Image: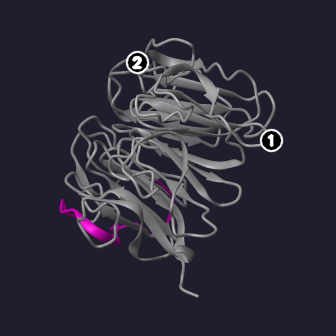
Amino acid sequence: MAEKRLKAWGNNRAGQLGDGTWTDFRTTATTVLGLTSAEVVKIAAGGAGTVNGHGLALLTDRTVQSWGSNGSGQLGDGSVFSHNAPGQVVNLSNATGIAAGGTHSLALLADRTVVSWGHNNYGQLGNGTNMDSSVPVRVEGLNKVVAISAGVNHSIALREDGTVWAWGHNIKGQLGDGTSASRNVPAPVGGLTGVTRIAAGGDHSLALVGEPGGSGNTVRAWGCNETGQLGDGTTQTRYTPVETAIGSGPVSLIAAGANHSIAVTGTDGVLIAWGQNTSGQLGDGTTDSRDKPAPVPGLTGVQLAAGGRAHTIVLLNDNTVRSWGANASGQLGNGTTIASTTPVTSLTALTGVDKIAAPVGGDFSVAN
């Protein structure tokens, strides 16, 4: 039996599918070169715009491989040259987590500090400067970190005490500190404790307060809300966290795309979504944006979810993949370039998928 491989599909103009080509796009899964599924522990996808994007893979030896766009050093290989096959991030050998933003990348280290690399025009690397770096640099003043997430131009981290710290672009309040001033070092998100999960969208952020899957937990959101992506029933930008209209419920997972938000709730894995829907990325059969969470009809058993620029991808309990939304680059992976407002089956050429990723501002998908 052939060895299982990491797969990707969608836009590839920057080599972000990692298959050794610059083919414009792929409507079904292609194999990421050189990486067996067995050695890949975690995957992440980044991108800002319809054509650029980059991929990251954390391996069992705690090194990180990267591929795709690299004009800002987001591949962390010491260069600014894009490559269409995986290569190693330099000076990084003890990573335990990864995140990819628009044009920057983050890694959580075994000592629970964070390093970053890539674009830094808004301070999204968190190292006290606004200079890009093509090699990993240390995020200042941040320790005891248990999770990281990256938006298009901002970064967030969850510490073991349940507080959330944020840095980078803040014109839409996505750092949650009550201001619109960008920061190049981490600062705490205002009034937020007891957090167990985080997710960064394009210009907004989400946090799960309370135990994942526990009754009575809540989702808080802050930042840009122009298309209802904060889910509080308004389209008013929020500079500090507000509670989404999910109410108290057993939410187990949160995720965010560029301008939409996603949560998995209930014991049967119901997916709920809210925010921008111009490409059908909410999966409800319409293109009407929503300022309050609503279920994706007919979809249960969701165990993982990820949001792209204008598409959504989920992994079901039977280890198959569904996706919906924009599809001009084949990012739904169903063999077409036709957008879908309801879930379609992604042709991953994989059995037993257990990891998925989509870039918060890009048009491709990755599965392992």
Residue 224 at least partly seen: yes
Point out residue 327 in the picture as x, y percentages from the top left corner.
Answer: 38, 46
Specify whether residue 95 is painted magenta.
Answer: yes
- How many marks are shown on the rendered structure? 2
Query: In terms of depth relative to the viewer, which is nearer, 318 or 264?
Result: 318
SS category of the residue bearing label 2: loop
Residue highlighted by disc 2: 226
Q: Which residue is mark 1?
A: 267
331 sits to left or right of 131:
right
Q: Is residue 142 visible?
A: no
* Depicted 59 relative to depicted 364: above or below: below
Residue 310: horizontal and vertical position, in percent? 41, 38
Q: Which mark is residue 365?
A: none
- Sort mark 1 into few (<14), some (14-19) or many (20+) by Cα contacts within 10 Å: few
Residue at (76, 40) in percent of width and height = 213
Q: Amino acid at mark 2?
A: Glu
Tell me residue 329's x, y (percent). Answer: 33, 51
In the foreground, 59 or 29: 29
Q: Earlier in the sequence, mark 2 or mark 1?
A: 2
Q: Is residue 57 placed above or below 245 in the rendered structure? A: below
Q: Is residue 169 magenta?
A: no
- Quadrant of res 169: top left
Name which quarter of the figure residue 273 lies in: top right
Q: Quadrant of the N terminus?
A: bottom right
- Disc 1, SS: loop
- Residue 205's place in the image compared with 224, above or below, is below
Q: Amino acid at mark 1?
A: Thr
Name which residue lies at 60% across and 64% down. Answer: 353
Residue at horizontal 49 percent and vertical 53 percent from the top: 357
Q: Which residues are magenta?
A: 78-98
